[in-house]
Image: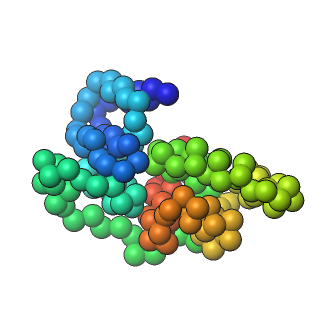
């Protein structure tokens, strides 16, 4: 799948799920087969990369040598749309869908689908979201960072 960003000027973070491939302020269109995140500021891109624990190549270290101030409190909940958007931009949405599809018990899988698709709010304390995060290899801090990122998204 090809992702296209642009054309307005923005900070762009391109990664393969493990390593940062690009962090730059660009204008015009950017096309990539990798996961892309677009933000208004360098700090937002750095915060996303840190929340996903992405490796940073030595030649990009200077771009990451900035302070990123995250809000002190993780929101208790975000809207379903904000949560989905955060997972999509972080490249985690396919993994969440695969996690739900792999739940062997049909009742538990149906309940997970309700949590994912039918609730209006996604709560940080939700057992489903914590289990999904753990299955994706995310730490509690990374899940917190995703909730923080989601709370900033306006659709």
- Viewer-proximal residue, 152 or 49? 49
Task: Identify the residue at horizontal 49%, vertical 72% (top origin).
Answer: 140
Task: Identify the residue at horizontal 68%, vertical 65% (top origin).
Answer: 128
> Is 72 displayed left or right of 10 in the figure?
right
Instruction: Give residue 90's position: percent from left, percent from top.
Output: 46, 49
Instruction: Give residue 139's position: percent from left, percent from top.
Output: 47, 69
> Is 70 displayed left or right of 100 in the figure?
left
**Does 130 sit above or below residue 98?**
below
- Viewer-proximal residue, 54 or 65? 54
- Viewer-proximal residue, 23 or 150? 23
Task: Identify the residue at horizontal 40%, vertical 58% (top origin).
Answer: 52
Instruction: Give residue 72's position: percent from left, percent from top.
Output: 40, 75
> Is 97 displayed left or right of 143 in the figure?
right
Quarter of the figure with residue 55: bottom left
**Does 152 sit above or below residue 24?**
below
Residue 151 seen in the current view: no
Instruction: Give residue 112's position: percent from left, percent from top.
Output: 75, 58
Residue 26 seen in the current view: yes
Task: Identify the residue at horizontal 28%, vertical 33% (top origin).
Answer: 9
């Amino acid at each position: 799948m090809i992702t296209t960003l642009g054309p307005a000027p923005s900070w762009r973070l391109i990664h393969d799920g493990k390593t940062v491939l690009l962090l730059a302020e660009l204008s015009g269109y950017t096309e990539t087969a990798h996961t892309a995140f677009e933000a208004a500021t360098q700090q937002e891109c750095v915060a996303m990369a840190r929340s996903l624990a992405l490796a940073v190549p030595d030649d990009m270290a200077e771009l990451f040598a900035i302070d990123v101030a995250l809000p002190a409190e993780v929101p208790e909940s975000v809207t379903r749309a904000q949560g989905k958007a955060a997972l999509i931009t972080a490249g985690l949405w396919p993994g969440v869908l695969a996690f739900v599809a792999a739940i062997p018990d049909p009742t538990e899988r149906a309940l997970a689908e309700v949590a994912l698709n039918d609730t209006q709010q996604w709560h940080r304390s939700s057992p489903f979201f914590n289990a999904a995060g753990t299955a994706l290899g995310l730490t509690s801090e990374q899940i917190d960072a995703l909730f923080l990122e989601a709370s900033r998204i306006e659709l």
